[in-house]
Amino acid sequence: MSLSFSISIRDEVTPLLRSLPATLGGDGIKLAIGRGVARLIQANFAALQSQRPNRHGWPRQGYWAQAARSVSQPKPDANGVTISIAQPGIAARWFGPTEIKPVAAKTLAIPASPEAYGTRPLDARWSGKLEFSMVGGKYMALVARDNFMRIVAKGKNAGKRVKASAEKATHGAGEIIFWLKRKVTMPQDKTVLPAAEDITAAAVMAAQDYVNAALAKGGKA
């Protein structure tokens, strides 16, 4: 699910913008406000990246770091400024619970193993290696056709699964790689963005800093 989630900052700063002299109005202060809020949003994503591990314990893919990089440059308009977040899933989490259905396929492929995480069934690495299965007679899945890994026998990685060639692979055949779902529901998570009062505070502080800097230069933006 790919959505551009936009945050419009208007009500909080419109009174301040209207109270400024013409020399301090315009897009300059709006851009300053937008940059201040964008930094806050990026800092929130960075905190989630460092504090929120993968819930399955699988290797992380840097989702929240990608979200931070997807925060757009602010765009001023007649009444305020807009910041967009292009990272898929942010809007679904914020507005959730959100029902997600496949668009170009009949089912969604949900990773069921560490090897599948961050990949898709159509990726080259899975070409010819998966087959359809009805697990328990009612759950659709794609399972490994052949062994594709081995278990390390000794050393510091003893007991861990590692990718292996067909000649050395001893495990994996029949293992569920992807669950196939006709729809999933993304639960609501308001923590993906800073609290409304924090966004307002960041906007007002950025505006005040801009005004103070402008006044120090003689009142010109």
Image (cartoon, rainbow, N blue to C red):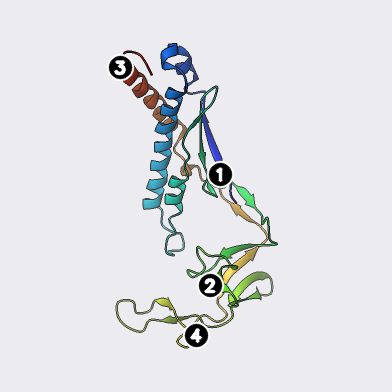
Residue type at tag 2: Arg
Residues under numbered marks 3 and 4 in contact, where contact means CB atoms less than 8 Å apart: no
Residues under numbered marks 2 and 1 in contact, where contact means CB atoms less than 8 Å apart: no
Residue type at tag 4: Ala
Residue occupied by mark 4: 166
**What residue do we see at 29% from left, 16% from top?**
216
**What residue do we see at 34% from left, 23% from top?**
209
Q: Is mark 4 on a helix, strand or loop?
A: loop
Q: Earlier in the sequence, mark 3 or mark 2?
A: 2
Q: Earlier in the sequence, mark 3 or mark 4?
A: 4
Q: Which of marks 2 and 1 is in front?
A: 2
Q: Earlier in the sequence, mark 2 or mark 4?
A: 2
Residue occupied by mark 3: 217
Residues under numbered marks 3 and 2 in contact, where contact means CB atoms less than 8 Å apart: no
* Residues at marks 2 and 1, CA–CA distance in whole angstroms: 30 Å
Determine whether, in the image, residue 41 is placed left or right of residue 139: left
Q: Position of residue 157 (x, y in %)?
A: 33, 76
Closest to the observer, 69 or 92: 69
**Label annotation for residue 125:** 2
Residues under numbered marks 1 and 3 in contact, where contact means CB atoms less than 8 Å apart: no
